[in-house]
Image (spheres, rainbow, N blue to C red):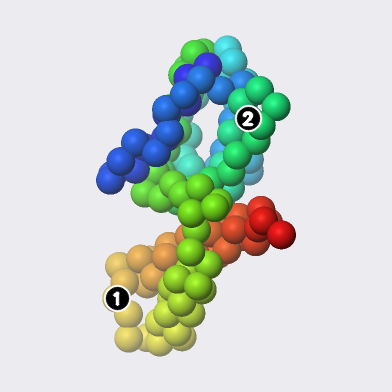
């Protein structure tokens, strides 16, 4: 089946794959060829791509996935390969978000939502990076 992963900035991936696992609000779903059609949300977490005997990993942000029998299209605000994640930069983003959230009373609802989303993405990035760190 054809997998495409796009962000507002670029097409991150486009290739035929055997299987893909995607984080959703209701848990991880695994898509195999001829999956029933489905449109659902994608949440920050680990996206796994299996092609032949190789599995690769990305961190994903918020978005949507559309699944047809032969195509999987992931549209997300973050998609980064595990080996591209800058752990120090993500740690700093996490720290800034946590500090901002401590000042909740000074944030508007929109700022609170944006900061919470930034923290969720940072935590997902760190989890994926640390799980697949090359030793």
Picture coordinates of residue 56 (x, y %)? 60, 39
Give the residue at mark 2: 50
Give the residue at mark 1: 108
Q: Earlier in the sequence, mark 2 or mark 1?
A: 2
What residue do we see at 47% from left, 24% from top?
15
Indicate the secondary structure of the residue bearing disc 1: loop
Picture coordinates of residue 17 (x, y %)? 56, 23
Is residue 52 visible in the rendered image? The answer is yes
What residue do we see at 67% from left, 56% from top?
134
Is residue 21 visible in the rendered image? The answer is no
What residue do we see at 57% from left, 63% from top?
126
| Residue farthest toward the front in the current orientation of the protein | 135
Picture coordinates of residue 29 (x, y %)? 62, 34
- Label drawn at residue 72: none
As drawn, 15 above or below 70: below
Indicate the secondary structure of the residue bearing disc 2: strand
Give the position of the C terminus as an image quadrant.
Answer: bottom right
What residue do we see at 46% from left, 40% from top?
41
């Amino acid at each position: 089946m054809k997998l495409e992963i796009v962000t507002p900035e670029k097409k991150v991936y486009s290739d035929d794959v055997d299987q893909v696992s995607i984080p959703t609000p209701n848990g991880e779903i695994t898509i195999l060829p001829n999956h029933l059609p489905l449109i659902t949300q994608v949440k920050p977490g680990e996206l796994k791509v299996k092609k032949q005997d190789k599995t690769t990993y990305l961190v994903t942000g918020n978005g949507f996935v559309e699944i047809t029998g032969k195509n999987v299209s992931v549209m997300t605000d973050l998609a980064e390969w595990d080996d591209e994640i800058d752990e120090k930069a993500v740690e700093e983003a996490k720290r800034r978000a946590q500090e901002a959230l401590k000042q909740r009373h000074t944030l508007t609802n929109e700022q609170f939502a944006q900061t919470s989303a930034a923290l969720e993405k940072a935590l997902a990035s760190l989890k994926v990076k640390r799980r697949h760190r090359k030793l």
